[in-house]
Amino acid sequence: MYRTGFGYDLHRLVSGRRLVLGGVEIPHELGLLGHSDADIVLHAVCDALLGAAGLGDIGEHFPDTDARFKDADSRELMRQTLRMTLDAGYEPVNVDVVIHAERPKLREHKPAIRAALAELLGIDATAVGVKATTNEGLDAIGRGEAMACSATALLRARKTR
Ligand code: MG
C-alpha cells in the first residue's frame, strides 16, 4: 500500500544568518531567518512525509514557540520525522524537491543536497530528486527577499516480518 504526501515551506532571507538547504551549508551573503536553522528543504520534506503518513504537520511536532527547537539542526527534526513515519508503519520510496530561489545559483550544490537527503532518509540517491527554479524576478522570492521549497514523498507500508 502506497501513500503520497506534499510539503511546502518559505522563509525570509536576511543578512547575518547561515543558508542551510537539505542540511548542506551554502555559501551566500544572506541566510534564512527562522526559529530553527530555517532549512526550507528539510522542513518541506518533513511535511511531505508527515502528510503521507497521516501524522499532521511539522508545526504540531516541532512548534517554533518551543525553546528546544531554537536554532535546531533540522537534520535532527528530519530524523525524528523519519522515526515517526516508520513507527506509523511506512517507509519512504522516493522524494522529489523543488527549491524556489532567485539567488544563489544552486546547480553546483544540488548533488550535495541530494546525497544529504538520501542519507537522512535511508534511500538511494537515485530516489531523491532535487530541482531548483527562479521566480523570474517576480514576487518576494523573485526579489530575493525569501526562498521556498516544495516537496513530495511516496511512502509504502513496511513489511511486518
Ligand atoms: Mg520552516
Image (cartoon, rainbow, N blue to C red):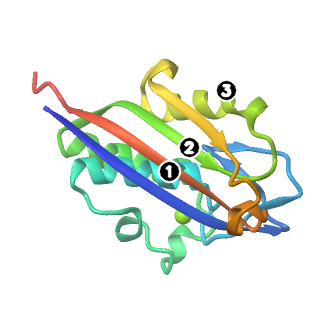
Q: Residues within 10 Å of mark 3 (few under 14, many from 20)?
A: some
- Residue at the (27%, 42%) spot, across then down: 4
Mark whose residue sits in front, 3 or 1: 1
Kind of residue sitting beneath label 1: Ser
Q: Which residue is mark 1?
A: 150
Q: Earlier in the sequence, mark 2 or mark 3?
A: 2
Q: Residues within 10 Å of mark 1 (few under 14, many from 20)?
A: many
Spatial distance from mark 2 to mark 3, Cα to Cα? 14 Å
SS for callout 2: strand
143 relative position to 52: left or right: right
- Estimate the x, y position of residue 151 in percent, counting from the top left: 46, 46
Kind of residue sitting beneath label 2: Val
- How many marks the image carries: the answer is 3
Spatial distance from mark 3 to mark 1, Cα to Cα? 18 Å
Displayed quadrant of residue 157: top left
Relative to 134, say whether 138 is above or below.
below
- Estimate the x, y position of residue 2 in percent, counting from the top left: 19, 34
- Estimate the x, y position of residue 21 in percent, counting from the top left: 65, 47
